[in-house]
């Protein structure tokens, strides 16, 4: 199975490739038909979001393998939306549709993150089932050992115990030795149960982002339709539409940056607790959320940079303050993306042999 890090890198490369392909293809103008198709996609995704929420709620209330599989199936039904760029957009009003598409991409990214978390939960459930099976077999041996001095621990069972991270040697073992192994396995069982509960919280967080960006996309489509009608009537200047889109992108970049700072603080606190021996908070789960926000900020920064460059080149916007605000948000976004590598390196050093962020 590919590691989460490899999957993330592949996804980022794919996104970058889509952006590059879009730019190489020439102007990316979104027409009314495209807007209608996007609106249909958003409506379809909202129906999926409702089903996903019900499925995840059921899995959280009763985290059986069947319920988790059902939630994964709902969240994994569709692929990511295509990427667009603001470069060369012939009508500045069309940038609003591209902003709606951007939010659609962000929503699908959050959906994929939720599905990935559920896959991790499924893997932990399989490990938990193996733990329960091994513990049951050891309890049978323990009951036999209570009437004799020793019992035989088979090489197969010893190997299964070792695969679960607990030391065991095949051969003659006493009841006390068996009970010690059982206690260690039960501790691992408790840790996994706690981890599954924590990860369900993060699944719900990603679902919240999924719904929020979908609603934002729907709102942007409605706004863009109104703007294009106003442009056609001559009551709204295209430059105003472009400025509105830049303002929306700037607000989104700033919002994500605030979330990144909050998540960074949570990571630092979790790492400090980890150093003190408190492993109740999963550093990996927090980093997954941080990494997801970095991916979001990277995409928003790409679009904001393109929008600023496009409007500046066409001369459709006026007023240095708006551009300066946009550039400030862009700088914050780029800084956050660049800072992710440093944050990850620090986490790996501090997590050390425990491999919390592998």
Image (cartoon, rainbow, N blue to C red):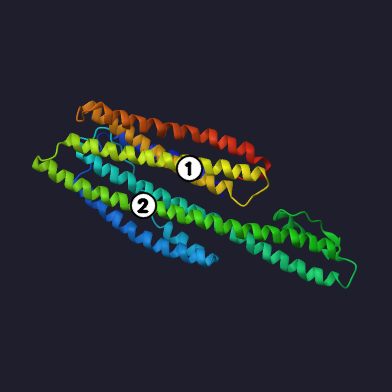
Q: Tag 1, which secondary structure?
A: helix
Question: Which residue in the structure is indicated by mark 2?
Answer: 212
Residue 219 circle label: none
Name the quarter where the C terminus is drawn. Answer: top right
The residue sitting at 61% across, 38% down in the picture is 348
Q: In the orientation shown, which residue stands out farthest toward the left? A: 233
Mark closest to the chain's N terminus, 2 or 1? 2
Place of residue 271 in the rendered image (x, y in percent of width and height, measured from the top left): 60, 42
311 up-or-down from 159: above or below: above
In percent of the image, x 36 and y 46: which residue is there?
105
Q: Regarding mark 2 in the picture, which secondary structure is present there?
A: helix
Front disc: 2 or 1 = 1
Mark 1: few/some/many CA within 10 Å (<14, 14-19, 20+): few
Q: Nearer the viewer, residue 334 or 169?
A: 334
For the question of whether residue 231 can be seen, the reply is yes
Question: Of 265 and 227, which appears nearest the observer?
Answer: 265
Residue indicated by mark 1: 262
Residue at left offset 66%, top offset 42%: 275
Q: Relative to 317, is 214 above or below?
A: below
- The image quarter containing residue 31 is top left
Q: Position of residue 332 (x, y in %)?
A: 41, 32
């Amino acid at each position: 199975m590919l590691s989460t890090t490899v999957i993330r890198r592949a996804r980022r490369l794919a996104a970058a490739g889509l952006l590059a392909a879009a730019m190489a293809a020439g102007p990316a103008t979104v027409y009314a038909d495209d807007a209608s198709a996007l609106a249909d996609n958003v409506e379809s995704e909202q129906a999926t979001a409702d089903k996903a929420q019900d499925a995840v709620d059921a899995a959280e209330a009763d985290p059986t393998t069947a319920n988790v599989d059902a939630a994964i199936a709902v969240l994994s039904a569709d692929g990511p939306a295509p990427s667009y760029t603001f470069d060369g957009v012939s009508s500045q009003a069309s940038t609003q549709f591209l902003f709606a598409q951007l939010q659609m991409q962000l929503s699908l990214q959050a959906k994929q993150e939720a599905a990935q978390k559920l896959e991790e939960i499924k893997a932990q459930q399989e490990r938990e089932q193996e733990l329960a099976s091994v513990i049951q077999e050891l309890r049978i041996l323990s009951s036999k050992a209570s009437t004799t001095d020793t019992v035989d621990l088979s090489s197969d069972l010893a190997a299964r115990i070792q695969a679960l991270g607990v030391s065991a040697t095949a051969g003659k073992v006493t009841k006390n030795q068996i009970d010690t192994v059982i206690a260690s396995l039960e501790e691992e069982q408790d840790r996994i149960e706690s981890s599954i509960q924590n990860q369900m919280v993060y699944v719900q967080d990603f679902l919240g982002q999924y719904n929020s960006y979908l609603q934002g996309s729907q709102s942007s489509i409605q706004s863009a339709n109104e703007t294009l009608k106003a442009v056609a009537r001559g009551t709204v200047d295209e430059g105003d539409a472009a400025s509105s889109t830049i303002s929306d992108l700037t607000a989104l970049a700033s919002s994500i940056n605030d979330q990144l700072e909050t998540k960074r603080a949570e990571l630092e606190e979790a790492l400090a607790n980890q150093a003190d021996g408190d492993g109740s908070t999963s550093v990996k789960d927090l980093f997954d959320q941080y990494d997801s926000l970095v991916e979001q900020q990277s995409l928003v920064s790409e679009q904001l940079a393109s929008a600023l460059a496009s409007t500046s080149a066409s001369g459709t916007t006026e007023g240095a303050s708006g551009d300066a605000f946009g550039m400030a948000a862009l700088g914050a976004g780029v800084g956050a993306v660049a800072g992710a590598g440093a944050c990850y390196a620090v986490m790996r050093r501090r997590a050390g042999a425990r491999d919390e962020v592998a």
